[in-house]
Image (tube, rainbow, N blue to C red):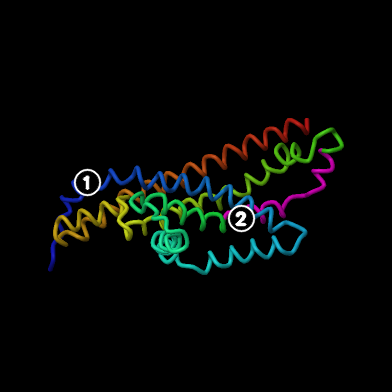
Amino acid sequence: MKTYALWKIPGFIIQIIPGITITIEYVVFSFIFGAFLGGLLALMKLSAKKLPRSIAYGYTTVMRCTPAIVMLFLVYYGVPQLVRNLTGYKMDTTEKIGYVIVTLTLFNAANLSEVFRSSYLSLDKTQVEASKSVGMTGLQAFIHVLFPQMFKSMLPNLSNTILMTLKNGSLAFTIGLMDVLGMGQKVIGKNVGAWVIETDIAMIAIYWPIALIITKLTGVLEKNYSFEHGKKAGGRRK
């Protein structure tokens, strides 16, 4: 029966930890950029015109049907080659994290557009008219009345999107990015394939706390937001 060198796991964790910085970097930036693009797509989906709606829904369908690793290869290998064929310009492919951020942004935009759209549609729009009747503009009504309600309903889905980004981003090691998984593969290579299970456990010991922190922070934010919202509503009722 094979025995496992579990005592090596702490050492492997120390070797893999430097990859956390890159992992967090592409998760944060792709989520922020994805939120902006997702907001634009949500507006297109809510448009009264058929063309922008069709483009936005078509984009979402394509992203949902495309494996993340395929999209990563298209962005990292395909885009530079296409640009070179069309313009003769050779794109820099050494900054791998930029290509990972672009890939994850495309996926996040598709997911977040649906989160924003469904949250907006769940609201009572008569609140906008009521807000305008007290002197608010449409933008002010959205910021101060609609968006706080949308944010509360979106929190669980936002957390899921961040966790999905964390998991999809682990594919970045396939193009040589030294994130958590990339550093883990480097450790395995340095040990010539020995202690693979121990190295995998070390990576899990890093990924799980990150995921748990994200989930916990979202839960705390949702609880505190609900409390503040309820307190304000209670104050108005008085």
User: Which of these two is toward me, 131 or 179?
Assistant: 179
User: Residue at (74%, 39%) from the top-left corner?
Assistant: 139
Q: Amino acid at mark 1?
A: Gln
Marks 2 and 1 close (CB-CB < 8 Å): no
Query: Can you say whether 225 is above or below 97 in the image?
Result: above
User: Which of these two is toward me, 192 or 85?
Assistant: 85
Query: Can you say whether 223 is above or below 49 in the image?
Result: above
User: Residue at (59%, 63%) from the top-left corner?
Assistant: 59
Of the image marks 2 and 1, the number of the one nearer the N terminus: 1
Q: Is residue 233 magenta?
A: no
Span of residues in magenta: 112-131
- The image quadrant where one finds the C terminus is top right
Dot 2 lies on which element?
Answer: helix
- The image quadrant where one finds the N terminus is bottom left
User: Residue at (63%, 49%) from the top-left corner?
Assistant: 153
Q: What residue did someone put label 1 on?
A: 15
The residue carrying pointer 1 sits among few (fewer than 14), some (14 to 19) or many (20 or more) residues within 10 Å by Cα, namely some
Q: What residue did someone put label 2 on?
A: 113
Magenta stretch secondary structure, dominant: helix
Q: Position of residue 129 (x, y in %)?
A: 84, 43
Q: Position of residue 225 (x, y in %)?
A: 60, 38
Residue furthest to the front in view is: 88
To which quarter of the image does residue 234 belong? Answer: top right
Measured Cα–Cα span from mark 2 to mark 1: 38 Å
The residue carrying pointer 2 sits among few (fewer than 14), some (14 to 19) or many (20 or more) residues within 10 Å by Cα, namely many
Q: Is residue 103 left or right of residue 226?
A: left
**Residue 70 has which mark?**
none
Q: Is residue 94 left or right of residue 153?
A: left
Q: Position of residue 45 (x, y in %)?
A: 69, 59
